[in-house]
Amino acid sequence: MTEVSTDHDCPNWNQEMLKEIQERYLFELRNGGMAVGAFDGKTLIGFGVLAHKFRGIQQDRLQVDLMYVSRNYRRRGIGTRILNELADEARRRGAKYLYISSTETRSAVSFYESNGSQLTKEVDEELFNKEPRDIHMIMELI
C-alpha cells in the first residue's frame, strides 16, 4: 500500500447517503446482523454494524459493514470499544476474521491497523465492486 496525496476528500453524508446507510443498517439487523452504539447521554456518537453473511473462500469472515465515530469523539477509545464488541460477537458466531472495507483516509486505515488489521490477500469481489476506493483489510480473531 502506498500513500498518495490527492485533493479527494471523503464526502460528508448527504440525505441520500444517510438513507442508504440507514437501509444497510436495518437490512443487517433484519437478517441477523448486530449493531453496537456509543452514546453521550442520549446522543448517538458512534456505531458499528456486524454483517450477517459469512464471506471468504472458507466462509470464515464476517464483515464490519458500517463503523463511524463522530469527529469530536475520536481518539478517545470509542472506536476501539465498538470494534472489540463486533469482534467478540463475530467470535461467538464462529468467525475467524473480521473483513473490513475501510474508507481510504489515513486516519481510518491507521485506526484499523492499530487494532490489529492488515491488508487482505483475499479481496471480496462483491465488496470491492461496491466500494473500489476502499482499503480492504482483515483482522484475525484470536
Image: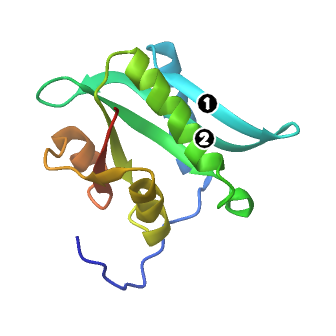
Q: Amino acid at mark 1?
A: Val
Residue 62, how many percent across, how many down? 33, 29
Q: Residue at x 47, y 22 (%)?
A: 89
Asked whether the beta carbons under mark 2 and mark 1 sit within 8 Å of each other, the answer is no
Residue 45, how many percent across, how many down? 73, 46
Which quadrant is the C terminus positioned in? Answer: top left
Which quadrant is the N terminus positioned in? Answer: bottom left
83 vs 95: above or below: below
Which quadrant of the figure has residue 42?
top right
Residue pointed to by mark 2: 81
Q: Is residue 82 visible?
A: yes
Q: Determine the secondary structure under disc 1.
A: strand
**Quick check: 44 left or right of 56?**
right
Q: Residue at x 42, y 85 (%)?
A: 7
Nearer to us of marks 2 and 1 is 2
Q: Amino acid at mark 2?
A: Arg
* 10 Å crowding of disc 2: few (<14), some (14-19), many (20+): some
Question: What colour scheme governs how the chains and residues are painted in the rendered image of this protein?
Answer: rainbow
Residue pointed to by mark 1: 36
Give whichever of 26, 122 is nearer the camera: 122
Give whichever of 99, 51 is nearer the camera: 99
Q: Is residue 18 visible?
A: no
In the image as oriented, which residue stretches furthest toward the front? 142
Residue 24, how many percent across, how many down? 48, 32
Residue 112, how many percent across, how many down? 43, 54
9 vs 30: above or below: below
Give whichever of 75, 64 is nearer the camera: 75
Q: Determine the secondary structure under disc 2.
A: helix
99 vs 115: above or below: above
**Quick check: 134 left or right of 83?**
left
